[in-house]
Amino acid sequence: MPDTLLTPSGNPDSATRHTATDILVLGSGLAGLRAAWAAREGAPHLRVTVACLKSAPSGSSFTNRNNALGVQLLDTEPRQSAFCHEAIALGRPGFVNKKLVEILASESQDRVREMEALGLRLRRNPDGSLARFPGCGSHDPRAAIFHDLNGAFNQYRIKTDSCGVDFSIGTEILGIVTDAGAARGAWGWDAGESAFTAVRARAVILALGGPAPLFARHQAGGANPGLSLGLLADAGVKTANEPFLQFMWGREDASFLNPASLLAPGHGLRMPDGSRLDAGEALGPTLPKLRALRLAHCPAFHHQPQAALDRLLLHGLHQDGFARVETPNGVIKAGLYAHAGNGGSVVDEHGQTSLPGLFAIGECATGMHGANRLGGAMVLATQVFGRRAGLAAARYAAGADLMDASLFRNWCDESTRQCGAMGNGRRTRQAIGRDLSRYALFGGTPGDRRGLEDFRTRLTGLVRLPDRRTRLAALTALLVSRPTDDPFQYTP
């Protein structure tokens, strides 16, 4: 019998459960579900399978702290033009593809109206008009906001189900299968079955989220191991902007703090050596302007003048990873949390990576933003490039063959044999997370370049370990911990 979705194939004695589909989507966030929907509509005669860890809402798309997301709605030419100008300027010095930014702008209105048609409700003013807000990094109120992310997930799931998309729940993806210079499927670990599983496919779409969950302190959504950059590196895919993560300041419970408010006149840092550093004395007459700039965005922005405020707070971090800010109302403990990644695979206008047959979207792709991104641009990118990648994968899969079942089985079995026991490496990965949150915050923790160098040396050894998760975590950490050499520093 020919291979079909979730139909075992190959040697029944193999330790790995083998199945096959036509288009394999890895991840079930906003990007992955939009891609699956598009792929199914683009090629209704082909099977589309979404492989994910959970059937419930997960990832930064559907499980963020605020139960709300913003999306850029660019429904006029002036709004599109302003968005492109701001996005490209904010993306420097990272890699930005102007063509991808322009595609985001030109397709924004159609994709947002599509979201409304699904049942997502955008916030309205009392008079019924659409409420608009400036996204982080912009003073122009273009972005719309929708709430109830659980409801949003359900609407996307209903849509994909109605299209005939299949779901494979419970798989943690650990590798992309490649053969003859193309992606041919993926393999991973099913904790529920305590077994490896592998899926042959004609095309693969990577939508597994970004690297923030690797950090000991992070604000990313659940069910994302944070290994996507490692998966891309392991498959030899070209990537960019990897060390440009979004970081947010927060209290010990991770509730948001803006450095502009923390470093108000009269406030000071109690330094680790017990001395006090006044914000005004530290930054002098530039403090008011820097505070005004920093108030306009929640995440720290790389290579922007106001980053000096973030660097000042980083200089005040104590051993526990929190700065002590003394205010007239008491001491505030502030730590820096990894939030989302701006780096990922370099893709074309259809989400195609440098590896034929592999498409990347969401936090797994970059170029539509660079070192920083405007608020609401990532949600927009999930829809614009999720749709584009799904349609492109459908076209690609229609002309591609499945990898020979015997060769695929041998490829995967060899990979799983090299993994060792799947329970190994937990403490090592926890140590990677602690060191990322100690040495690799916001392009490299100030004043500890030697610590970062030693950490990266340790990582080069860890990538050679047999434990698969540890190897992928180390590969990812090597990419995100590269110093960004930001010129806007606080210098004591």
Image: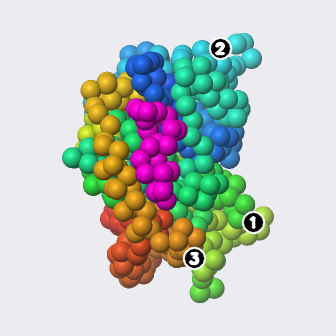
Residue under numbered circle 3: 427
Q: Quadrant of the C terminus?
A: bottom left
Residue 328: mark in rendering: 1
Q: In this rendering, would 143 be left or right of 306?
A: right
Q: Position of residue 53 (x, y in %)?
A: 59, 48
Q: Does the rendering let one see residue 156?
A: yes
Residue at the location (43% across, 15% down)?
Answer: 76
Amino acid at the residue labelled 1: Pro
Q: Secondary structure at mark 2?
A: loop
Question: Quick check: is 13 in the magenta stretch?
Answer: yes
Disc 3 to disc 2, C-alpha distance: 52 Å
Mark earlier in primary sequence (1, 3): 1
Colour logic: rainbow
Ranked by sequence position, the earlier of labels 3 and 2 is 2
Which of label 3 and label 2 is nearer to you? 3
State the CA–CA distance, disc 1 to disc 3. Answer: 41 Å
Q: Relative to residue 481, is residue 353 depicted above or below?
A: above
The quadrant in which residue 182 appears is top left
User: Magenta stretch?
Assistant: 1-24
Is 248 covered by the magenta stretch? no
Q: Position of residue 134 (x, y in %)?
A: 54, 32
Main SS category, magenta section:
loop
Disc 2 designates what residue?
129
The one nearer the camera, 267 or 481, is: 481
Q: Residues within 10 Å of mark 3 (few under 14, many from 20)?
A: few
